[in-house]
Structure formats: C-alpha cells, structure tokens
Image (tube, rainbow, N blue to C red):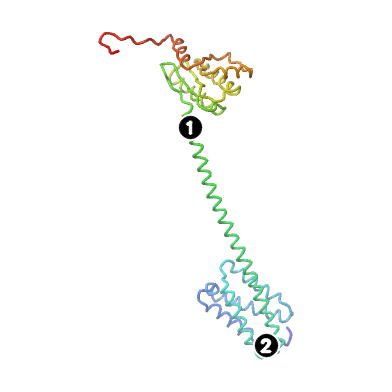
Amino acid sequence: MQAAFAWIEHERAGLASQLAERLAGRAGSVFRSAGEATCTAIAEGLIAALIADAASGKDAAGREAMLALVQRFSGALAYADLRHLATSLRSLVLAAASGAEPGERQRVEDWLFQLVLVGAMRFVAQREQTFQEQAARLEVRQLESQLEELKAAFAEKTRLLEVIRQASTPVAPVHEGILVVPLVGMFDAQRAQMLTERLLNAIGEARASVVIVDISGVPLFDAEAAELVIRTSQAVRLLGAQLLLVGLSPGVAQTIVDLGVDLASLKTMRSLQDGISHALALRQLRIAPVVNGPGRGR
C-alpha cells in the first residue's frame, strides 16, 4: 500500500466497526434483518476493498465487493438500503480522511463515486431482471389458465358433439323384430362406426331381423357414404338381419349410378313407408284397415 494512504489502514478497525453498527441499526433494512455478523462481514469487506484499491490505484476490489453484495441480497435489497450503505460509508471514510492530502481525499471521493455507480447500475439491472422474471411467470400462469379454459371448452364441445351424434343417430323399434334408423346430417366414417355399433347392440337386444335405414335427411350421399352403408349392411347380415335402405331421391340414385357404386347387395326403396311395408311383409305381417263395428264411433 502506498504510504500516502497509511491513514486508511490506521482507521480500518474503527471504520468497519462504525459502518457495521450503522447498517445493523437502521430499522426495517435488509442488513438489520441479516444480523450483526453479516453487517460486520459486509463492512470489513468494503474497507478491505478500499485499502486494496488505494494500494493498486484501481477500483477493481471495490467493484467486486459491491457486485457481490447486491447479488447476495438479490430480490430483498431495496434502493433505500443501498443508499443508506453508500451515504454511511462516504460520511465515515471522508471523516477519517479529514487530515489527508487533497489528492488522497479526491482519490477516495472518486473511489466512493465508482462504488455507488456500480452498485446502482447492478441494482437496477437486477431489479429489471426480477421484474421480467415476474412478468414471465405471470404470463405463463395466464397462458396455463387460458389453456385449461380451452381444454375445458374443447371437452365440453366434444361432449356436446357426441350428444348431437347420438341424438342424430337414433335406433327406433317400430314393430317386433323391425328397427328404423333415420339419419340426419352428414354421414361420415366416424358416424358410420357409431351407427354400426348401435345397430349391432340394438339387433341383439331386440332380436330384430329387419333394419330400415332412412337417408332422406342426409344432405350429401356420395360414393363414400354409400360404401359406409354397405359395410354396415354386411355387419348387420352377420347377425342374421337384413338392412333396407330407404329415402333415395332420384337425384341421389343418379349420382350413385354415375359414380359407379354397386348397391346390388342392398335392398333399396324410395320412401320409409315402402320400407316399413316391405319389412312387415318379410315378417309375414301386413297393415290392415280398422273396420268400425256395431257400437263403435266413426
């Protein structure tokens, strides 16, 4: 250490003790919460850095000490704590340098200024990083909340679609051994699978021998839809039942012919009434008119 700065070494113990006392004595500060031992370590470290930089003519030790201090209290250090530290250290050091040469005093002033500047810059950078991390965590929580809402909405939509599909693919018994399935809306692979499963279950439960599928409510009955119905018919035949396809309009019939789809394996009829009449005939039944007898109203 340069002899010109011998007074710093002479005042070292007193400066560290007084600075530690001031740090620990300020109510509500992060230093007081850290305890007297921590305050003593901080004070001794800063005075040691001042002595080292006075000897080297640089500010490296002071910068390192201040950066370590701000990092140590990351997130808990307030600007008021940093200001209290800087003002306390400055007043104590300059009071001890009252008898020093003007050049020595100016050197100490410059060192203190650099110390405060480094501390302030590091404090601001760290606070900005903290704010960004908090904002990022908040954004993540918001996104997670939105994702949960979307999942719930998707689950509800899926449930409603399933309800709609179930409601739009009813299997209704019209007579013993005869089931009617009126299809409404688009007929795709998923719906065909659902229809086949429900039909097979219904055939087993009702011991049905005839199934009438009415497609008059299907807006687009193309080659794919026809193939799906054929597959369903094949599954129905495995249970010993027959599938009747009704509701084909002339336009749909022409489209099926133009597409080259072979419906020869299916019994097709134009209307639901024709299908029911044919189903009754297959079961050796018929619809007879009600004749008014004596005593019956007309």
In 3D space, how far apart are the residues under numbered discs 2 and 1 (Cα atoms)? 91 Å
Percent across and percent down for residue 178 are: 44, 17
Q: Nearer the viewer, residue 93 or 162?
A: 162
The first of marks 2 and 1 along the sequence is 2
Q: Residue at x 73, y 81 (%)?
A: 55
Percent across and percent down for residue 141 are: 54, 53
Per the image, label 2 sits on a secondary structure element best described as: helix
Quadrant position of the N terminus in the picture: bottom right
* 290 to the left or right of 98: left
Circle 2 Cα neighbour tier, 10 Å, few/some/many (<14 / 14–19 / ≥20) = some
Q: Which residue is mark 2?
A: 7
Circle 1 Cα neighbour tier, 10 Å, few/some/many (<14 / 14–19 / ≥20) = few
* 2 to the left or right of 29: right
- Extreme-front residue of the structure: 298
Does residue 178 sit above or below 67 in this rendering?
above
Residue type at tag 1: Ile
- Extreme-left residue of the structure: 295
Percent across and percent down for residue 150 are: 53, 44
User: Residue 262's image quarter?
Assistant: top right
Does residue 23 sit above or below 146 in this rendering?
below
Q: Residue at x 50, y 26 (%)?
A: 184
Q: Nearer the viewer, residue 49 or 188?
A: 188
Residue type at tag 2: Trp
Per the image, label 1 sits on a secondary structure element best described as: helix
Q: Which residue is mark 1?
A: 164
User: Residue 234's image quarter?
Assistant: top right
Quadrant position of the C terminus in the picture: top left
Percent across and percent down for residue 81 are: 57, 74
User: Residue 131's image quarter?
Assistant: bottom right
